[in-house]
Image (cartoon, grey):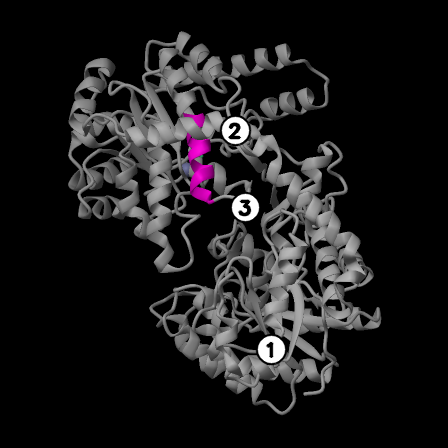
Amino acid sequence: MNATPFTATVLGTPRIGPNRELKRATEKYWAGELRRAELEAVAAGLRRDTWAGLAAAGLDSIPVNTSSYYDQVLDTAVLVGALPERVAGISDDLDRYFAAARGNAAVAPLEMTKWFDTNYHYIVPEIGPATTFSLNPAKVLGELAEAVELGIPARPVIVGPLTFLALSKAVDGADAPLARLDELTEVYAELLGTLADTGAEWVQIDEPVLVTDICAEAPTLAAKVYNRLGGLSKRPAIFVATYFGDPGAGLPALAGTPVEAIGVDLVYGPNTAIATVPELASKTLVAGVVDGRNIWRTDLQAALSKLATLLGSAESVVVSTSCSTLHVPYSLTPETELDDALRSWLAFGAEKVAEVAILARALGEGREAVADEIDASNAAVASRRCDPRLNNAAVRAEIARITAAGSQRGSAESRRDAQGARLDLPPLPTTTIGSFPQTVEIRKARAALVAGRIDEAEYTKQMKAEIAAVIRLQEDLGLDVLVHGEPERNDMVQYFAEQLDGFFATRNGWVQSYGSRCVRPPVLFGDVTRPEPMTTAWARYAQTLTDKPVKGMLTGPVTILAWSFVRDDQPLADTANQVALAIREETVDLESAGIAIIQVDEPALRELLPLRDADKEAYLRWAVGAFRLATSGVADSTQIHTHLCYSEFGEVIGAIADLDADVTSIEAARSHMEVLDDLNAIGFSNSVGPGVYDIHSPRVPSTEEMVTSLREALDAVPAQRLWVNPDCGLKTRKTDEVTESLRNMVSAAKAVRV
Ligand code: GLN
Ligand code: ZN
């Protein structure tokens, strides 16, 4: 294989546009306001700009085929001809693609789930008996041709066959998708031939599944696939990329095949045993030393030392990001409101590319060639280390004090008695998960406040009016435990981040979450403190409007971490405890304000679960510890609720019980209450509110179907422990849907009570 060697690259880039241009264009296309050619022009322009930026920064191999109208896994399903039959009849290929992603009036979309342990969601391919694979390379060939035309040293990127099948779902009684690996590998073989014909010197094949324990045979299967693909006589040089962790046995397995280059993530797999794999001596090692998924500036000195240790183990060493920078914002340039110190600690997408180029130069020309850059990096490292905002002795001492005393509440029984006496609730109490619809008026008011068209007082007045309306509605419907409806919250994490010290919100730090949807995670950079109460005024106001108990509503420490960019200079567990302490202070203030029930949401508990089985227990221990720290500061007579959603609780079910919340509301409507049996199996004995209807759909559920759900639930849980609620917050729904659904829900509860 005589491919041109390279020295500096990234595994992929953000693609939604520096100002979310692709998001806007795509949504207009969906709304029928933009023609296909116009959408394609926006995407092509973004690709050109991205490639030009990477080339100008000094990268000598540039990933292409990383742009996407929705998702790279869905793109791969199209590439290998594996879209399900139900969309196959749609003649326009782009409409077919979007129908698979989002559904339409006639077809249900494919499922969506988290991409490894990131906050990005991919479309889950369906592999059934009817699935046939066939090569459909128009997208990758088109992007390759565009790049070649522009003189870009292009390297097409595709999701590997092993990862593709491991992440797919078997449907219609088919065997596990990996049973089709040999067959699918032949489609990749054909693709490699086609790429070679089109002039690709290199191809990057992503196999992140090798850093997980999803499939025990993955290393063996990888050896088989890459022996086959590596043995082809006509193909580009193959670079297999692993990322998000240590590939373990996957590394020697890949190194034993004829592939030319192997990528390792040395940020999330710092102990990857490179030196113990002799076969790497004849390979190119693509060393991911620049963090591709968090926003901290690289310690160039440390990275360079790491790179130096690799030089003897491989034929050549390429500098790279640890993974695609899809997971970080485009650039620091728009972040004009940061102080100089804070700014100097950060690197977004563009800054990471520059770091890769600097490190590659140091490797090629010697450290002196980039001495100034290394000095600047050292200065940033030093400034971050000694900044007082990162080390608040009082917070640390308080956490040590509470953890030493033990974050224990009274026994479940004494809590139940104390709460029963205080609350006077009927059996099967009805409640909601917290948010009510975020109406146009609410969003308008928030935008007006941000733009300075209304002042804080006017905004508060409008929010109070909304709270009053929501309380009235709940009283009319006859709910037992009311909520204030969360109108004042833009987002359940950002709302708290904006009020806590140790966080900052970016101006333009958007990252793709799924499809056209972007999020702007706050940055948790320092020790977290709560300067003043965050939610009590709203809760207290809501409680003045009703004699029914109003539930205080907080976001839990794990979820706040999961949806932020978090400092990397101390264990996550320590940071979680600091957030937990702030939430704990808030629970105590809510209690003093007369709030008898406080819900601490942890929908992201499952999300931060480590990729390797061996690391899961330690994570669950600190996650549970942080929740308990947050919730053990109140009296036994104050009822603590938690809420979890996003399904698949299997691996975290024990931890859910360990949270020891008095009441746990949990998504169950789509899984037919199975979660209750799982909870029983581990001896869970606190109260539980399995969602009786799915809020993700506009459909209004009938009383009868919720009665059926509740009867099903009563087979698993006695009436004294059962709550009645929807399966998640109502913020995305319309007020009339919510009114009808909750009316039916209350009737269902009443019907089952008698
Ligand atoms: N309390 C939040 C709400 O009702 C919970 C949201 C969630 O579970 N993601 O919106
Ligand atoms: Zn939820």
Indicate whether residue 580 is drawn in magenta: yes
> Over which residues does the magenta segment extend?
571-583
Residue designated by label 2 = 392
Q: Is residue 290 left or right of residue 368?
A: left
Q: Quadrant of residue 475?
A: top left
What amino acid type should be assigned to the residue bearing mark 2?
Asn
Q: Is residue 181 left or right of residue 443?
A: left
Residue appearing at x 46%, y 79% in the figure: 253
Disc 1 crowd rating (10 Å Cα; few below 14, some 14-19, many 20+) is many
- Using the image, determine if residue 561 lies above or below residue 378: above
Foreground residue among 220 and 528? 528
- x, y (%) of residue 627? 36, 34
**Quadrant the N terminus occupies:** bottom right
Residue designated by label 3 = 568
Badge 3 marks a residue whose secondary structure is loop
Badge 2 marks a residue whose secondary structure is loop
Residue appearing at x 68%, y 60% in the figure: 67
Foreground residue among 672 and 292? 292
Disc 1 to disc 3, C-alpha distance: 29 Å
